[in-house]
Image (spheres, coloured by chain):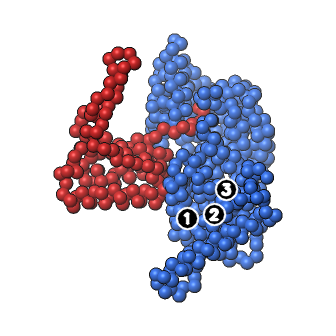
Amino acid sequence: MKYMLLIWNRPGFVEELSEEERNAIFGDVDRIMAELTASGELVGGDALAHPSQTRTVRAGAHAGAVEVTDGPFVESKEQFAGYLMVDCETPERAAEIAASWPDVTHGVGVLEVRPVMDQAGTEM
Amino acid sequence: MTDRAVEDLLRTLAPQVLGVLVRRHGQFYACEDAVQEALLAAATQWPAQGVPEHPRSWLVTVATRRLTDEWRSERARRDREVAVAAREPAYPAVAPAADEEPPAGDDTLKLLFLCCHPALTGSAQVALTLRAVGGLSTAEIARAYLVPEATMSQRIRRAKQRIEAAGARFVLPSPADRDDRLRAVLRVLYLIFNEGYTASSGDELHRAELTGEAIRLARELHRLLPDDGEVAGLLALMLLTDSHRAARTGPGGELIPLAEQDRSRWDRAEIAAGVALVTEALTWSAPGPYQVQAAIAAVHAEAPSAAETDWPQIVALYRVLARIAPNPMVTLNQAAAVAMVDGPRAGLALLASLDADERTAGHHRLAAVRAHLLELAGERTAARAAYLAAARATTSRPEQRYLEVRAARLAADR
């Protein structure tokens, strides 16, 4: 079963960290990615650029019109910062991976664990 | 020979060649890699240059050459690093022994047991079985399971490491372990089948091939173990389930429930083979879960329509299944059958017990069956709510679509 782990954290929190803390976090990320690669669970993942680089696209006032604004869709202290896609045995295992992620262990963000819809199905 | 014929030949030969190598050299890990490389070489050379006169020997020779090349470079590397005098092979696990060649079927069995070793997770057992016994390439397995090739490659590598670490041997399991180990093999074949069967048509062709592969392996297992009723039951269940393939989805890929399928599109040859297999097995074997499930599928298969199904017989079979393999999912299906005999209220009453079971409480299948029975009982509002609850809980797109359509119908034609 595939799960997407959505990483939410406060933009710019890294700027307030000491070099030591920063290295610890990046070290954790490298270690977990290596582990997930070795176990054959990692499907993909990426970090996103700072939210200030975001453009939000929505329907405009007139029919067929589109409005593009600078800045993220959700106005909140925490922003969507990146994701991991894993393919693992159980939802508990997906949550365990999320629990080991540095944003959680260092208390600087949260992870959402969301099952990815399967294209297969059984008739009922 | 066509590409397809070459591919079939390679898949049949794969476990035989791997068996020969592992018996001669031990070292399942290295041998499996070497055989995979030989298979890839054959897949590119044979269609163009023709199949060699002795294809199995060709593969054994090429794989052995890869293996010795690998040892040589491994040896050279070690000699450079430290002057080790060790004459032992790099991976002592998985002992060989026999100098005489047992029949190839024995090797296939041993490989199946090895690939479905209890030290492995289910997905690792599946991946390794498809590669080492099924002869599929990593790329093919990755495409079928919709993950990157690198992910699948790592999964297989890790599985092989685990097997070595667990000290697993290339032998048949002891009589004490045999039943448990065989159940694991059957489960893996069933998982492979299901992965292919549930795939929707069209863009999912690579996944659908898994169904054929699972049936091929089950057939081979049945040939090797003709006296095992559950092996026959599993093969029958696969054939009977697969017989619905053409009728189970509509033109847009939407799921069509059993009751509404066009039965003229069911595959009669597969049905006949499945019915014969399970009927014969049940005359001499104690009924196991796969046989009973196949028997249920056979009753459905022989009914001209949903209404003319022998529902009392199906209820009786579910009762047997619930006794030999108690499981809330069995109760769920039993409730649906009971509703057809004693009415929807009786079915709904059976479902009530499942709300307290953490394995089914909140499960989309429970909500879906409840929705169906409520609809039969004429409780449209409650049925619609249950369909929507099921649609929210499922992680399958086609199932969600089906459930949403059922809910919408109840909202529309009141």
Q: Position of residue B11 (x, y in %)?
A: 71, 56
Q: Do the CB atoms of the residues marked 3 and 1 lie less than 8 Å apart?
A: no
Q: Colour of chain A?
A: red
Element type where label 1 sits in the image? helix
- The image quadrant of residue B228 is bottom right
Crowd tier of the residue under label 3, counting other residues whose Cα lies within 10 Å: few below 14, some 14–19, many 20 or above: many
Q: Amino acid at mark 1?
A: Lys
Q: Is residue A17 left or right of residue B128?
A: left
Q: Amino acid at mark 3?
A: Gly
Circles 3 and 1 on the same chain: yes
Residue placed under numbered mark 3 in the picture: B134
Q: Amino acid at mark 2?
A: Glu
Crowd tier of the residue under label 2, counting other residues whose Cα lies within 10 Å: few below 14, some 14–19, many 20 or above: some
Element type where label 3 sits in the image? loop
Element type where label 2 sits in the image? helix
The numbered disc on residue B160 is 1
Q: Residue at x 47, y 26 (%)?
A: B388
Circles 2 and 3 on the same chain: yes
The numbered disc on residue B299 is none
Q: Position of residue B63 (x, y in %)?
A: 67, 68
Disc on the earlier residue, 1 or 2: 2
Residue placed under numbered mark 2 in the picture: B37
Examine the rendering and report whether any part of residue A34 can be seen.
yes
Q: Chain of mark 2?
A: B
Disc on the earlier residue, 3 or 1: 3
Q: Position of residue B277 (x, y in %)?
A: 77, 46
